[in-house]
Image: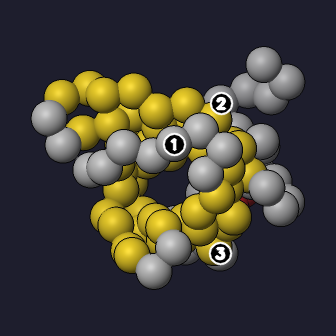
Amino acid sequence: RAYLRFFLRGKGILQRKDKYLGVLTADASRQGLKFLSPVQLLPKERCRIRLPKTKEFQIEIVRCRRVSEGCYECGAMFVLGTMSADED
């Protein structure tokens, strides 16, 4: 990994095309983040995510695995810009 991860437990809003989904964030680095989604997302898919007390980020899904029914662990990279720990 190029950058260290930091805990980022909280809620977020994922915009996937014209739909909005509630997600739970797990951790983040300057290049991306991990979150739980209620639906499966496909690698290379581009979405937007809004996190509390921060701005909106454009992300690209790099992995998604099913944890349980209706719960998918997703990893994504920021497409534009990076996130630093002080934006938490």
- Quarter of the figure with residue 21: bottom left
Q: Is residue 23 left or right of residue 78?
A: left
Q: Is residue 5 above or below residue 11?
A: above
Which of the marked residues, 2 or 1, is nearer the chain's N terminus?
Answer: 2
Q: Is residue 76 above or below residue 78?
A: above
Name the outermost residue toward the top: 1
Which of the marked residues, 1 or 3, is nearer the chain's N terminus?
Answer: 1
Dot 2, crowdedness within 10 Å: few (<14), some or many (≥20)?
Answer: some
Residue at 77% x, 42% y is: 31
Q: Nearer the viewer, residue 21 or 87?
A: 21
Name the outermost residue toward the bottom: 18
* Mark identifier at residue 55: 3
Q: Nearer the viewer, residue 40 or 74?
A: 40
Q: Is residue 43 above or below residue 80?
A: above
The amino acid pointed to by label 2 is Arg
Pointer 1 residue:
42
Pointer 2 residue:
5
The quarter in which the C terminus is drawn is bottom right
Marks 2/1: CA distance?
23 Å
